[in-house]
Image: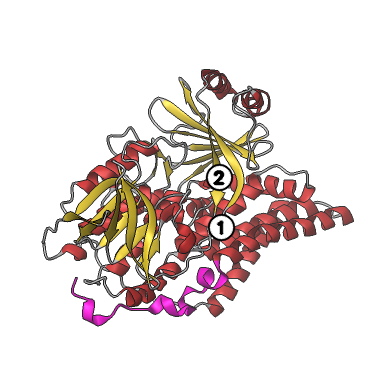
């Protein structure tokens, strides 16, 4: 009887939201150009560069169409994509050696689909990447497995986990094979501006020489620590927690080919394979500081607080990894996209938009953004009319919203729900979330399809989030409601609203739920330049 009441409440909530949404939303169909249309003329264009020095100032004269600052996941993928479409691309990257990071190691199935759309799916080959078919959740001795809904997709479609640096190097290599893409090592010092328009960049070469490079469009992809985004957006960076990273060896996961999330106290712990012999462990530590590594406080914290909460079969390998001493830390940053549309420049990747890495959605958002930008630029032959291009590309910020806002909102909301709390209503929400996902069927498939990037629908996210809250209230009120339980139920709904609505507000309600009502959504390129 209790389950029927809860399930009935869930579906009543779903139907209500869908009716409201259907009443307001204006549906529109947008034609997407084929992926190979951009280079249909078969021409192979090369980037030519010459250096001119006058009165001690060196200027790099380049006939590039686009300068890309940074060659991480976003920059390298974008360079290959625009180069394949016939653009002359120059990439300036601070360090072209293989990166060594503890995040950016899990690509969701939705991100893999975007990788396929960009023709980069072979970049996860030959790097010992591991297939990921879903998640396993652990809480207070209980566990449940959540599988990605992949039945309707090609057999190759799944998540992938890997060493971030290996993946980036593969994409850099593939981009550099194109004759019209030039990768150069250098540190970009500033953007070159003239009457409000970005004309290029000033950078320091590997040998220390200060140079200037020019192109009609500069795309900044210099990562989460970007020093260039200040003039292109309103960066409101939040650091809710830090990750402590370890690599476990000689160990098996309870559910192989699955990401593992332990709902620990005070916050979640993640495990997933990054190679056939290594398991990445990320311990979330709330706040902006972690215990000291040098005096042994961090090791003590990991052994006494964290180790007892992880699955028993992994504890020995976990302690061995701590004793080995290769402990890495990094801050977890979130930053909503708040761009200043600027002629001649665009932000992409973590320089533009970040979310908590708990859900592993960063690369999916970046690759999805590249697909949107590629489709917008494809009809344009000439990028030199910076003002007109800037007005046209304002549609990018709306067209990216379904995928980006869904993943961003889910990451922020799930992190807050999964963290332990002294508040009884928050604890009840945490319990309800675990039990709701454990129901299986539509109750797990819906949230997992959102998490995986396979179903990037903001409305579906809101429906499932409040369905969890209603499920929690139903558990409180059955079998016999009491004033205390009714009050806690009200607090649970209030707490759920307090978690998700501020995130939605930061993402933009209109762009997130009613994108077709935003004028820029329907903006078209000038017909005079549609011969590309």
**How busy is the neighbourhood of tag 1: few (under 14 within 10 Å), some, or many (20 plus)?**
many
Q: Which residues are magenta?
A: 508-532
- Residue 488 as seen in the image, left or right of residue 49: right
Residue drawn at the location 63% of the way across and 42% of the way down: 288
**How busy is the neighbourhood of tag 2: few (under 14 within 10 Å), some, or many (20 plus)?**
many
Is residue 518 found inside the magenta-colored segment of the image? yes
Q: Nearer the viewer, residue 360 or 197?
A: 197
Is residue 348 found inside the magenta-colored segment of the image? no
Q: Which numbered disc, 1 or 2, marks the residue closer to the eye?
A: 2
Q: Position of residue 2 (x, y in %)?
A: 73, 52
Q: Nearer the viewer, residue 140 or 202?
A: 202
Residue drawn at the location 73% of the way across and 59% of the way down: 493
Q: Position of residue 154 (x, y in %)?
A: 32, 49
**Residue with the mark numbered 1:** 409
- How many angstroms separate mark 1 from mark 2 (CA)? 15 Å
Residue drawn at the location 51% of the way across and 50% of the way down: 448
The residue furthest front is 55
Q: Quadrant of residue 34?
A: bottom left
Q: Position of residue 57 (x, y in %)?
A: 28, 55
| Residue 332 disc label | 2
> Residue 442, relative to residue 329: is it above or below?
below
């Amino acid at each position: 009887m209790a389950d029927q009441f809860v399930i009935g409440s869930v579906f009543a909530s779903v139907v209500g939201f869908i009716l409201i949404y259907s009443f307001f939303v204006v549906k529109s169909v947008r034609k997407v150009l084929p992926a190979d249309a951009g280079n249909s003329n078969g021409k192979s264009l090369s980037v030519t560069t010459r250096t001119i020095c006058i009165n001690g100032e060196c200027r790099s004269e380049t006939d590039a169409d686009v300068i890309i600052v940074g060659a991480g996941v976003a920059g390298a993928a974008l360079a290959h994509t625009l180069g394949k479409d016939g653009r002359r691309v120059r990439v300036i990257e601070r360090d072209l050696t293989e990166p060594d990071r503890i995040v950016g190691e899990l690509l969701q199935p939705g991100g893999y689909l975007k990788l396929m759309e960009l023709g980069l799916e072979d970049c996860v080959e030959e790097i010992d990447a591991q297939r990921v078919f879903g998640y396993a959740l652990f809480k207070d001795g209980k566990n449940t497995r959540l599988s990605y809904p992949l039945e309707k997709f090609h057999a190759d479609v799944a998540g992938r986990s890997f060493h971030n640096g290996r993946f980036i190097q593969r994409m850099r290599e593939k981009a550099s094979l194109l004759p019209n893409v030039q990768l150069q090592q250098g540190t970009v010092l500033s953007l070159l501006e003239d009457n409000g328009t970005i004309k290029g960049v000033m950078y320091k070469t590997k040998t220390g020489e200060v140079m200037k490079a020019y192109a009609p469009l500069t795309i900044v992809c210099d990562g989460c620590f970007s020093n260039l985004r200040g003039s292109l957006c309103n960066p409101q960076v939040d650091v809710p927690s830090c990750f402590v990273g370890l690599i476990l060896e000689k160990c098996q996961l309870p559910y192989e080919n699955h990401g593992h999330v332990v709902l620990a106290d005070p916050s979640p712990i993640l495990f997933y394979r990054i190679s056939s012999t290594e398991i990445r462990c990320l311990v979330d530590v709330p706040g902006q500081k972690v215990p000291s590594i040098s005096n042994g406080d961090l090791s003590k914290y990991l052994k006494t607080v964290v180790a007892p909460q992880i699955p028993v079969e992994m504890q020995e390998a976990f302690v061995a990894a701590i004793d080995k001493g290769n402990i890495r830390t990094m801050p977890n940053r979130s930053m909503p996209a708040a761009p200043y549309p600027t002629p001649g420049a665009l932000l992409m990747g973590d320089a533009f938009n970040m979310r908590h890495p708990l859900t592993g959605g960063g690369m999916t958002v970046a690759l999805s953004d590249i697909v949107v930008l590629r489709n917008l630029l494809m009809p344009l032959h000439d990028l030199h009319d910076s003002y007109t291009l800037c007005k046209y590309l304002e549609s990018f910020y709306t067209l990216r919203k379904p995928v980006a806002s869904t993943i961003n909102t889910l990451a922020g909301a799930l992190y807050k729900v999964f963290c332990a709390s002294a508040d009884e209503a928050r604890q009840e929400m945490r319990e309800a979330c675990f039990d709701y996902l454990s129901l299986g069927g539509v109750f797990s498939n819906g949230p997992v399809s959102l998490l995986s990037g396979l179903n990037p629908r903001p409305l579906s996210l809101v429906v499932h989030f409040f369905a969890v809250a209603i499920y929690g209230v139903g558990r409180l009120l059955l079998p016999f409601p009491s004033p205390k339980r009714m009050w806690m139920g009200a607090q649970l709904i209030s707490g759920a609203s307090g978690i998700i609505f501020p995130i939605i507000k930061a993402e933009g309600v209109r762009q997130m739920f009613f994108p077709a009502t935003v004028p820029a959504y329907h903006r078209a390129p000038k017909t005079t330049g549609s011969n590309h």
